[in-house]
Image: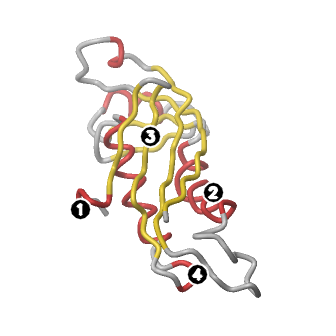
Amino acid sequence: MQITRRLEFDAGHRIPNHRSQCRHLHGHRYVIEITLSGGIVNDDRSAQDGMVMDFADVKSIAKQHVADLWDHAFLVARNDHAVVDFLATLPGHKTVILDRAPTAENLAQLAFDILEPLYRDSYGIHLYLERVRIYETPNCWADALRSEGIG
């Protein structure tokens, strides 16, 4: 059985080597979808009876470890020195420095790597993170998949 939970957050970024508009500082209303697979809990004494995982718990983990950290932050590659240096001059600015360019593909991979161990084997049932999908816009997204050996 597979379940999916969707969360949204706002963040700024830039892709420094991009040939078009994305090389400029800008922001997005990102959407992250977390897809898990696992067995359905069959225990009428459990609050999770009939569920793979409570959607509230799926949300809580993704929110605490990804969405809240990236929300209203500027996501910047460590080697984008001009932007890293500029953001350092803004007192109290929420900056997240990444090892790679903050593309949708890299954000999906990073979120997968962060979340995969947190969901694994929850509730004593074999639970797997199957996919993290990051929408950069309503029409553009990237998927990090367990089947691709990510995590």
Total numbered labels placed on residues in the image? 4
Q: Marks 3 and 1, how far apart in space?
A: 18 Å
Residue 40 at what x, y percent from top left?
Answer: 57, 74
Residue annotated with mark 2:
59
The amino acid on which the numbered mark 4 sits, given as a three-letter code, is Tyr
Residue 108 at what x, y percent from top left?
Answer: 38, 46
Q: Is residue 102 above or below residue 17?
A: below
Q: Badge 4, how many Cα within 10 Å: few under 14, some, many 20+?
A: few
Task: Assign a secondary structure to mark 2.
Answer: helix
Q: Which disc, if any, is residue 149?
A: 1
Residue annotated with mark 4:
123
The amino acid on which the numbered mark 1 sits, given as a three-letter code, is Gly
Q: In this rendering, which labeled residue sits more in front, label 3 or label 4?
A: 4
Q: Earlier in the sequence, mark 4 or mark 1?
A: 4
Q: Marks 3 and 2, how far apart in space?
A: 15 Å
Q: Is residue 9 left or right of residue 129?
A: right
